Image: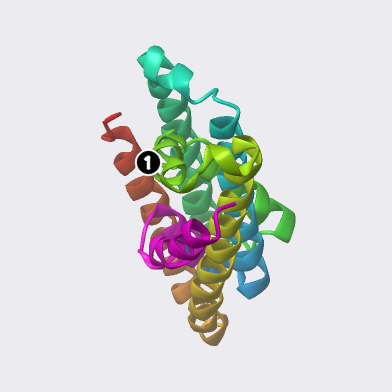
Amino acid sequence: MDFYLFLAFIPAAIALNLTPGADMLFCLGQGLRSGPKQAFAASAGVSMGSMTHVTIAGLGLGAAMSAFPWIFDVIRWIGVGYLLYLAVTALRSSTQSGESVRLTSLQAFRQGYFVNLSNPKVILFVLAFIPQFVDPTQGSVFVQFLMYGAIIAINGFLVNGLVGAFASGLGQAMAGSNKFQRGIGYVIATIFTALALRLAILEKS
């Protein structure tokens, strides 16, 4: 990797990770719902999904989405359906039991992974952002994709996890209130619904 390109990439990646977005909002919701451990697990899932997108882009398969726009729409609507399913699940768990059901770390990780993976906009962003810092004369383009992607994923894991852990403090402080826990269920359902709507109205360009 070119040393100066690498130095330029670091602040760009940090700025990217600090920008509030769907992944950060998702991890915040998991922190409120289940606590700091699950918030970091959800953040790890998001980062793993991001690395999956980077790997696909590095292999050149992302070009298929430009050649066949319907692939983008298929993935997008699968993501919309999954997010709405999570919204309904969160709502039911609160209205039926009177409290928001805490996820296991594995469940939080899995949800984070599929929420990120089902957003086709991520791979399009990767294809637009990372190639600016790739130098074909410095070795394998695929390896450079993975290295730059790993930087984004690690930074994102820390930032999104910390946001979720911070939010968990509020959830833990009010854990004894059934009314508050029902409210958390409604908040989580609203977050998932908003993310689904956001994904539904995304355009490819």
Classified by dominant secondary structure, the portion drawn in magenta counts as: helix
Q: Which residues are magenta?
A: 1-28
Residue 20 among magenta residues: yes
23 versus 100 height, above or below: above
Q: Classify 134 as above or below 25.
A: above
Q: Is residue 62 left or right of residue 45?
A: left
The quarter of the picture where residue 145 lies is: top right
- Looking at the image, the residue that sits furthest to the bottom is 173
Q: Position of residue 46 (x, y in %)?
A: 57, 52
Q: How is the image coloured?
A: rainbow
Q: In terms of depth relative to the viewer, which is nearer, 80 or 116?
A: 116
**Residue at which label 1 appears:** 196
Relative to 131, is 104 above or below?
A: below
Instruction: Decide which of 131, 75 is in the foreground and name it.
Output: 131
| Residues packed near mark 1 inside 10 Å, few (<14), some (14 to 19) or many (20 plus) | many
Q: Is residue 86 left or right of residue 192?
A: right
> What residue sits 37% from the left and 47% below the top?
195
Q: Note whether residue 166 is visible.
A: yes
Q: Nearer the viewer, residue 189 or 51?
A: 51
Q: Quadrant of the C terminus?
A: top left
Q: Residue at x 49, y 65 (%)?
A: 7
Q: Which amino acid, by three-letter code, is at mark 1?
A: Ala
The image position of residue 168, as x and y in percent, is: 54, 77
Q: Nearer the viewer, residue 34 or 66?
A: 66
Q: Is residue 43 magenta?
A: no
For image coordinates 36% across by 16% down, the residue present is 69
- Quarter occupied by residue 132: top left
User: Which residue extends farthest front?
Assistant: 137
Residue 99 in sight in this render: no
Q: Secondary structure at mark 1?
A: helix
